[in-house]
Image: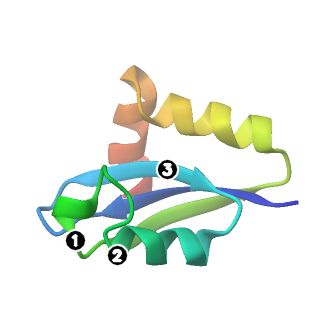
Amino acid sequence: MSHYVYILKCSDNSYYVGSSDNLKTRINYHNRGLVNSTKDRRPVKISWYCCFENKTKALQFEKYLKKGSGFAFSRKRLI
């Protein structure tokens, strides 16, 4: 099963990094206000995403993008 890591651009020009096995549904949840982290920053738009065949690797990459050099990498290279 595919697993996605994604970066959303929020209405306040901030970014949110997340992961899901169903990208389209997850973005819909964000825009409907069902995700606490983004409910006050709607609407959101997909800025970048990547598909992984392995859920563990996707979660590791999501964690990398949220910290230190991965955060800097995402801002410089992905968005």
According to the image, what is the colour scheme of the structure? rainbow
Q: Disc number at residue 66? A: none
| Depth order, front residue of 72/4 | 4
Query: In the picture, residue 29 is in which quadrant?
Result: bottom left
Coordinates of residue 21 in the picture (x, y in percent): 71, 60
Looking at the image, residue 43 sits to the left or right of residue 79; the answer is: left
Q: Reading the chain from its start, which is encountered first: label 2 or label 3?
A: 3
Please report the residue visible at 24 percent of the width from the left and 76 percent of the height from the top: 43
**As drawn, 70 above or below 53:** above
Residue 37 in the image, given as x and y percentages of width and height: 30, 49
Q: Residue 31 has which mark?
A: 2
Q: Nearer the viewer, mark 2 or mark 3?
A: 2
User: Answer yes or no: do the residues labelled 1 and 2 have beta carbons within 8 Å?
Assistant: yes
Q: Are marks 2 and 3 in contact (CB under 8 Å)?
A: no
The CA span between labels 1 and 3 is 15 Å
Residue shown at 28% from the left, 53% from the top? 15
Query: Residue 52: image x %, image y %?
Result: 77, 53
Residue, disc 1: 42
Q: Which amino acid, by three-letter code, is at mark 3?
A: Gly
Residue 34 horizontal side relative to residue 60, left or right: left
Rendered-image quadrant of the N terminus? bottom right
Point out residue 66 in the picture as x, y percentages from the top left corner: 42, 33
